[in-house]
Image (cartoon, rainbow, N blue to C red):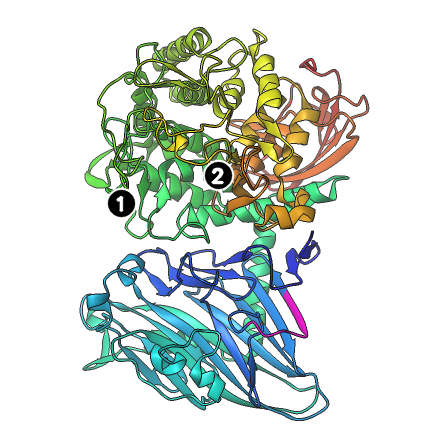
């Protein structure tokens, strides 16, 4: 069942009913100010950090779901409603929500009045602009009132929801002209305030929540709206809100537009006040002036469209697959940019409080956006590296506002360091900027203790070498990529964090996954060593890689598939010897991606085992059989009911590793089959089962052992976006950035006849037409650049900034179909 449709021309998803299976959201903002906005106008806004600089309140796990946002109530002679349906939920004569790239447009109509709410964060602007257009579609004059509403958060979102003995007494506002200023705690240590404005005279206002709603009312029936009369309340403590009342008269067919701005201002410490106790409003006034009429919003929307034109033009696909084009050209890269901005901090499944920017997460996310914004990828790499410890370990997370490591979580996740090598190599392959390796980068954000980025990478590599277990495999530490496989936790106390609790000290538990990751990233580090003339260092690194490959084959293969780990007691995890959890997806993907077992024929065995044991109609589950009880030696993974999350759920993040592994052995049909099983555009028709947005990836889908098989959760902020983009654009379509150019190595369904990719690379634009006359899945017969045959399959940068034609003919597959 569908609840909308794709409008590819306008790059929008159009939702035709407000009652979607779960709130379907969008993100506003691309730089420092951000907003989450659902198809019913729910959500919230923040500046840079969703925990420390939250402008508006949002209650997670609320009843009803998604209750709270930026609402506009229309009062029409006793009848009142909202264009997004929520929170009033009165039946609408017409409803439509259009989620576009960085903007959302919601339209509702009832009783001869149509209201459109267009929301966006303009480029270079620290605020949301909501253009509300009220139209009279009846044949009579309409006298209506429009009430706006936001509820302010007292900045620190965690403190706001816990510290009531203080917070119910601190709220302060100012009102001047048609602007409501939220200035809680500005009198003391804060130098920032929020404002909510409209570019029209007000008939009244409210800033006190109780006065606006009524103490025992909800957002569905505020007493101010039901009465059609504002109370001009001024908040003093309790809960500050912002609500304007506008009186509107419309002739038949007439429309009126109003620009509302929810903005953020910081003032210098010596410039906080315009007079004693009165905030300096000049920056806010200047921001408001930028959007004084309709044309200003039109221009901002055009600039936003041009911005996305530029980003999305870096990689475009023309193929016979409409759904594939849609994913590659629009929605997958869009989601990758959102994960760049948010990491795992703020979504409808992440509260913006408990998690900041992840060390592992941000390095993986970089793989999906580095081609779009390489300069910001460079900055991100240096930020991430700054949270590394001298021993090569790292904070698992850091706060986006301070850019300092999160002490509450700490480190000890032994896969983390290797991702820095992967992210940095991806950046250099894209840009050719080897100079980043010479940047001085702090350890633990201490400017007095620095080393080159290359030294950071070296310590990342040797952090694994210096932390090996009894079999010579990498020690897992608190966890590896699977944060819920906690082999040293042994937690028996409720409320202990599985990730930060380590009740058993020991150097026994090992990870086969980290071994695969080590071998996969190692060649990139070797190349970087060689480029710096470090021949002996490169040889030493190669020795460590060869040894790890051999150890993985000897101690990490279980006969038909790769083991997952060894636990604290030295027992196998992910083995046929286990009663439950006999096979895991992660090592099958990464070990084969690293080439381990390919020559020996073990890779085929492992991937066939995935198909036989792990694959379902909705994707590949994480492990099988699921754990039926809590295992003290395994940790959080066994705490979930069977089929959910890490306990045999479909983790969409690691499904693309199997797709990429399949291309390593030349099975293009198989790789694309797996791709289409979890790509959102291919799931639109089962939205009633899938539930989350059909235009972006979710982190997880309930597995075959779950009660609600096929149901997704945790949409938007997931490494699924980046890895699926890498899988489709590099492994399947085969356009692979290398240190010296673009390698062409498609691995596609044998039935595909041709496709064309336009790829911007180091300033040049390559139009790459791939033909497949022999109907093979893998193999290159010839590559021509501007009518000249290349010796090999790597397109070198031309360096003239021009457009270049590349003709690729596939044939004589280099890998035999197994």
Q: In which quadrant of the rendered image does the C terminus lie?
A: top right
Depth check: give the residue in front, 775 or 213. 213
Residue at 58% from the left image edge and 73% from the top image edge? 83
The answer to which of marks 2 and 1 sits earlier in the sequence is 1
725 relative position to 7: left or right: left
Visible residue check, residue 437: yes
Does residue 110 lie above or below 783 as drawn? below
Which mark is nearer the camera, 2 or 1?
A: 2
Rate crowding at label 2 as few (under 14), some (14 to 19) or many (20 or more) other CA atoms within 10 Å.
Answer: many
Secondary structure beneath dot 2 equals: loop
Does residue 54 lie above or below 477 as drawn? below
Rate crowding at label 1 as few (under 14), some (14 to 19) or many (20 or more) other CA atoms within 10 Å.
Answer: some
Secondary structure beneath dot 1 equals: loop
Q: Which residues make up the magenta segment?
A: 89-96
Does residue 499 lie above or below 255 as drawn? above
Which image quadrant for residue 549? top left
From the top left corner, tell me how far across and down residue 101 is, in percent: 57, 56
In magenta segment, residue 266: no
Residue occupied by mark 2:
719
On residue 404, the disc is 1
Q: Mark 2 to mark 1: distance in Å?
A: 22 Å
In magenta segment, residue 94: yes
From the top left corner, tell me how far across and down residue 27 is, in percent: 50, 57
């Amino acid at each position: 069942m569908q609840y909308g449709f794709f409008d590819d021309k306008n790059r929008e998803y159009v939702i035709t009913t407000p009652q979607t299976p779960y709130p379907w959201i969008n993100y506003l903002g691309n730089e420092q100010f951000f907003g989450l906005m659902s198809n019913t106008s729910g959500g919230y806004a923040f500046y840079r950090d969703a925990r420390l600089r939250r402008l508006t309140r949002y209650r997670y796990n609320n009843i009803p779901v998604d209750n709270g946002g930026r609402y506009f109530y229309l009062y029409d002679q006793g009848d009142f409603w909202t264009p997004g349906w929520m929170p009033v939920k009165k039946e609408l004569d017409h409803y439509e929500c259009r989620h576009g790239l960085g903007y959302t447009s919601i339209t509702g109509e009832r009783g001869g009045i149509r209201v459109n709410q267009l929301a966006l964060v303009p480029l270079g602007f620290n605020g949301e602009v909501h253009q509300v257009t009220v139209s009279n579609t009846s044949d009579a004059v309409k006298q209506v009132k429009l009430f706006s509403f936001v509820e302010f958060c007292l900045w620190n979102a965690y403190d706001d929801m816990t510290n009531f003995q203080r917070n119910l007494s601190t709220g302060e506002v100012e009102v001047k002209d048609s602007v409501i200023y939220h200035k809680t705690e500005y009198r003391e240590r804060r130098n920032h305030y929020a404002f909510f404005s409209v570019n029209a005279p007000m008939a009244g206002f409210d800033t006190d929540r109780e006065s606006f709603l009524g103490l025992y009312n909800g957002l569905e029936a505020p007493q101010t709206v039901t009465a059609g009369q504002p109370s001009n309340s001024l908040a003093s403590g309790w809960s500050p809100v912002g609500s304007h009342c506008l009186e509107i008269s419309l002739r038949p067919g007439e429309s009126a537009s109003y620009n509302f701005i929810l903005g953020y201002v910081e003032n210098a410490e010596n410039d906080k006040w315009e007079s004693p106790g009165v905030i300096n409003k000049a920056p806010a006034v200047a921001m408001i002036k930028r959007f004084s009429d309709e044309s200003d919003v039109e221009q901002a929307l055009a600039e936003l469209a041009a911005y996305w034109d530029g980003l999305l033009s870096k990689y475009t696909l023309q193929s016979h697959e409409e759904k594939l084009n849609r994913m590659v050209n629009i929605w997958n890269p869009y989601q990758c940019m959102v994960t760049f901005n948010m990491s795992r901090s703020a979504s409808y499944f992440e509260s913006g409080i408990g998690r900041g920017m992840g060390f592992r997460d941000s390095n993986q996310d970089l793989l999906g956006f580095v081609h779009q914004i390489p300069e910001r990828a460079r900055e991100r790499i240096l930020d991430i590296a700054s949270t590394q410890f001298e021993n090569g370990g790292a904070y698992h997370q850091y706060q986006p506002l301070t850019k300092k490591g999160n002490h509450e979580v700490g480190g000890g996740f032994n896969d983390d360091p290797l991702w820095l090598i992967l992210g940095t190599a991806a950046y250099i392959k894209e840009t050719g900027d080897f100079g980043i390796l010479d940047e001085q980068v702090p350890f633990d954000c201490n400017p007095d203790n620095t080393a080159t980025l290359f030294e950071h990478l070296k310590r990342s590599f040797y952090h694994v070498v210096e932390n090996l277990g009894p079999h010579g495999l990498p020690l897992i530490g608190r966890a590896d990529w699977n944060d819920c496989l906690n082999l040293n936790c042994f937690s028996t106390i409720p409320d202990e964090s599985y990730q930060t609790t380590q009740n058993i000290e020991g150097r026994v538990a090992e990870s086969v996954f980290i071994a695969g990751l080590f071998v996969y990233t190692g060649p990139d580090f070797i190349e970087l060593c060689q480029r710096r003339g470090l021949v002996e260092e490169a040889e030493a690194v190669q020795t460590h890689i060869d040894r790890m490959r051999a150890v993985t084959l000897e101690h990490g293969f279980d006969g038909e598939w790769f083991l997952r780990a060894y636990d604290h007691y030295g027992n196998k995890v992910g083995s046929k010897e286990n009663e439950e959890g006999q096979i895991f997806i992660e090592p099958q993907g990464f070990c084969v991606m690293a080439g381990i077992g390919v020559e020996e024929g073990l890779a085929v065995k492992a991937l066939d085992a995935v198909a036989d044991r792990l694959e379902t109609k909705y994707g590949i589950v994480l492990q099988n059989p699921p754990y039926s009880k809590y295992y003290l030696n395994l940790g959080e993974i066994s705490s979930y009911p069977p089929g959910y999350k890490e306990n045999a759920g479909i983790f969409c993040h690691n499904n693309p590793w199997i797709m990429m592994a399949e291309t390593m052995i030349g099975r293009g049909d198989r790789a694309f089959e797996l791709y289409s099983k979890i790509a959102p555009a291919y799931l639109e028709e089962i939205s009633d089962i899938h539930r989350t947005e059909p235009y972006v990836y979710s982190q997880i889908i309930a597995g075959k052992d779950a009660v609600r098989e096929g149901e997704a959760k945790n949409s938007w902020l997931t490494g699924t976006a980046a890895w699926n983009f890498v899988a489709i654009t590099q492994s399947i379509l085969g356009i692979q950035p290398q240190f010296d150019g673009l390698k062409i190595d498609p691995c596609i369904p044998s039935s595909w006849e041709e496709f064309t990719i336009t790829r911007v690379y180091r300033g040049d634009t390559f139009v790459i037409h791939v033909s497949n006359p022999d109907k093979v899945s893998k193999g290159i017969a010839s590559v021509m650049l501007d009518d000249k045959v290349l010796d090999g399959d790597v397109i070198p940068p031309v360096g003239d900034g021009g457009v270049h034609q590349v003709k690729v003919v596939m044939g004589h597959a280099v890998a035999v179909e197994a």
